[in-house]
Image (spheres, rainbow, N blue to C red):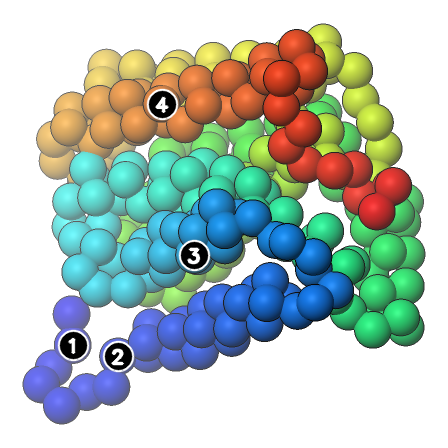
Amino acid sequence: MHNHGDFPAESLFLIPAVAAVAAYWAGARSPRAGTWPYRRLVSFLAGVLSVLLTVLEPLAGWAHTDFGALALSHVLAGMAGPLLLVLSHPVELALRTLDTVPAARLRRSVRSPAARFLTHPGTTTVLVAAGMWAMFHTPVLTAMQQSMPVHWLVTAYLTATGCLFTAAVLNCGPSPHGLRLRAGALAATAALHAGSAVWLLAFPPAGTGSTSAGALVLLVSGLAVQTVLALLLLGQQRGTARLLPQVRGA
């Protein structure tokens, strides 16, 4: 909460958010982008908004006192937002519209060994699981509720790992991976997510009060996002949708 007349520091997050939207809009309007689907622009806007809501008032403030709001923040920043951002194809757009030199640098970056490692389904599953465990089963939970900077750092981690995981499941990284591996990663993460929600129902963390509503938010909304991701994965396998062109072939 802020005193009257104080400048809310979290408002500074509007600057990179607006810059990202402006850059994406400019790219989508560029002749180099071709006929860029309008739905991708909508997806990008929705993804940025989903993440931004978790660091701005009132949701950020509610998350410090209400576990349900904290659980909703987790789903928005770590699951729904990343799914929308990945489906907006930002890397493909950048590779199409950047000048030759920066486009070549970006292409080398996304094809680098580090990028291959970070977009491997196994790696992303571990990163997501680690973040999930830390957020709900370690002192990080209390630190998030007591410190806004910690809340921001956790949000950044959730968003970054969520984007990597979504990209890995939808096979849009620099290396191809088989359906079984990607489906296994999704299934494992869904099981961990549901298990965390059930655990919170049975064993509420000390100092958080009632966690029942938050655990249900975590379970239901998380399952909804994971179901959408599973349907997209199934659509790829059946050849009914070409969702994300591979970076390696861009």
Q: Secondary structure at mark 3?
A: helix
Q: How far is mark 3 from mark 1, CA to CA? A: 28 Å
Mark 3 highlights which residue? 45
State which tag comes first along the sequence, 3 or 1. Answer: 1
Residue count near mark 4 (Cα–Cα under 10 Å), binned few <14, some 14–19, many ≥20: some
User: Do the residues under discs 3 and 2 have CB atoms within 8 angstroms?
Assistant: no
**Is residue 172 placed above or below 14 in the rendered structure?**
above
Indicate which label's residue lies in the foreground, 3 or 4: 3
Please name the amino acid that badge 1 sits on. Answer: His
Would you say 188 lies left or right of 140 here?
right
Please name the amino acid that badge 4 sits on. Answer: Ala
Please name the amino acid that badge 2 sits on. Answer: Pro
Please name the amino acid that badge 3 sits on. Answer: Leu
Residue count near mark 1 (Cα–Cα under 10 Å), binned few <14, some 14–19, many ≥20: few
Mark 2 highlights which residue? 8
State which tag comes first along the sequence, 3 or 4. Answer: 3
Q: Position of residue 210 (x, y in %)?
A: 12, 31
Mark 1 highlights which residue? 2
Quadrant, the N terminus: bottom left
Q: How far is mark 2 from mark 4, CA to CA? A: 33 Å
Indicate which label's residue lies in the foreground, 2 or 4: 4
Q: Position of residue 17 (x, y in %)?
A: 45, 69
